[in-house]
Amino acid sequence: MMDQLEDFESFLEKVDKISELVKELKSSDADAQQKAVEKADHYISAFALEVDEPCRTKINRTTINTNPPPQPSSLNSSSVSPENFMKIMERDAEDRRQRRREKEEKAIALKVKGNAAYTQEDYETAVKYYSDGLAELRDMQQLYTNRAQAYIKLGKYKEAISDCEWALKCNEKCIKAYLHMGKAYMALKNYNKSRNCYEKIVEIEPGREKMVKEYLTQVDLEEERESQERSAREEFDKGEEKATTVPQLLEKLSRPEQIPLYYCGGLELLSQAITDCTGQTLFRLNNGFSIISSNDMVRSCLLQKTREPYAQELCVSVLKLWRMICNGNDENQKMLMTCPASSQSIVYLVTSEHIAVRTECLALLCLYSQMPHSRGLAIDNLNLHMLMKNLMECISKPKQQQENTAVVVLEKFASENNFCMQLRDVLAESVCVPFTTILRNISRSNQHVLPPLISAIGCLARDDVIRHNMAHNPECWEAFLVAMKHCSACEFKDILYPMLGLIINLSTINSPAIQEHAVSLSGLCLGLLSDSDGGIITRATGVLSTVLPQSPAAVQHAVQEGVVRTIRRLLKGPGQTTTKYAIKTLTVCTAASHLAREELVKSDKRLSILRRLLGSSCDEMVSGNAALCLGHCLELEGIASNLLGTDFVPLLLHHAAGNAKRTAVQQNAAIALGKLCRSEPRHVNKLRELHGLEILHSCMKLIT
């Protein structure tokens, strides 16, 4: 490696010499030119004696090159001109470029072979190909980082670090080099250097902060694991009773073909002995997980395949022990979750017919759901399709007493993107069917579990694919209608509030299913606008603002039911969110219904509500919709004349000439201003006074 660095430095020295030589050859001084020609002759003669390889060797090169090429007679000091010398150097540079291209092609071909070997987990062969590639081209960064990755797989961490350092000499901002070096240092238990490598990545690319945070968490966990195991071994070596008890009990539990009661007793004693992190660690170090999961009697109990006496008690004892040894111990959580026997039984036992088993299983899942790292472990190793079905089944049976824990687990897992992504393909069976069944059967017995369940489904619906699929699912909308009617009749406002929020989220997507039920849905929301609960009113208005744009029939029905009058009343209130939903609803109605415009103008001839919104709201959606709604109303004859003497012209002009980022507001304000002046020319006088004609002209393309 040092030879390579020396080669590079030597190359730079030669470049400097040639640059100086060229300057001297171009000198106006004849003596200086003659000296330069002599130097060039000497330099070329010396250069001709070198072999054509970039690597150094300690052997005398003139000895190796037994047949040096003959030196052209034209290179003597009396015949070489500056022009000839430059031609020689250019030919040499072109030869070098050609040779480099050939070497690059060979190196790339070897890299491809190395990648193929790596993919097949033949890491030794991959290293050989990458090394052969570097023999061809020693400054190819990808070969260094790829070989480092293969070295890590082979446990050759120092070699991996060395390759990463060379990759950084090729490219000081090489992310992969820092990534692999961080892994290698962590494997060597040099945790501070590992952290430094990962932190360097954020300095280079701040956008990778989330990824780096995950790697730093791994370093912390690995350092904690090493510390725990060191302390546990020290206590065991001292002969501490609590440290020696765990291995002794595990040895007794490893005895095969005992009755369930024998193992129950042993597990109970083991649970009592494990009181701290040292006990948890000694359990892991003494193969506690494999001793339990490989026991035929224990396995049959966990899979509910035996009717032996005390089989259920044994199952409960195992689950209790698992929860105890995993509580606060990340490495134990990883060991348990990556064991196929335990991960399979955990999912299966959620719906056990025995209450105590279900309780302990859900308690264990709840433990895993508390922190992002442990949630990730569970999501990566559990059958999520089956887990979701079983959790929903548990939630749908409130008499079993575990529905509260089940919905907490679901809500926590639903906050993880990876959980949502893995449910996309099984959404209908795992989520929609059980969820709609529960919505159709709301009662006093399951009333308490619906709000957190709807919240969990709302978390799932943050995923674009899940939201799209639910929005297009007719059964979901039919169930929403049934649930809304029942909740309105029974005063289940604690359910109605989150359900309306979920409907708002889903109805932002246009779908035939929503359009089919839009009239019924908007009718129910109109009824809720007179509710005493302000939160219900706000969300009902929100549903109207997203559902009405999808159905002209729903708009006509809402207008006939007096929505304009109700919305105008809401717009007089102080709530910002309600105002945003209400003005959008009013704008949708006035856009589609002549009757809606007439009703608004009839109840407010000078459109004071819209004037107030244009003048006071800082919300882009509110002011933009107010301008658009005004434009709709100005299509009625005589309305522009009613607005003489108001401040609509300066208000609209202010928005039309406003922040260029608020293009929707500018467009709507310009259109309304154009309609106002066209319908009533006297408004143009005010526009001239404010020097607004130029602004209006610049917005002409928006008006047309």
Image (cartoon, rainbow, N blue to C red):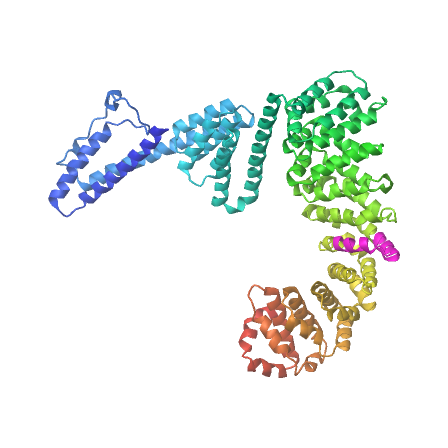
**Is residue 511 something that shows in the picture?**
no
Chief secondary structure of the magenta portion: helix
Which residues are the magenta region? 481-502
Decide whether residue 496 is among the magenta residues. yes
Residue 306, given in percent of the width and then of the height, sits at 83, 23
Left or right relative to 467: residue 560: right
Position of 97 relative to 578 (above/below): above
Residue 484, given in percent of the width and then of the height, sits at 83, 55
Decide whether residue 486 is among the magenta residues. yes
Residue 375, given in percent of the width and then of the height, sits at 67, 38
> Looking at this view, is 19 or 550 the one in front?
19
> Looking at this view, is 696 or 145 the one in front?
145
> Looking at this view, is 696 or 311 the one in front?
311
**Is residue 482 something that shows in the picture?**
yes
> Looking at this view, is 178 or 105 the one in front?
178
Picture quarter with the C terminus:
bottom right
Residue at position x 55%, y 25% in the image: 121
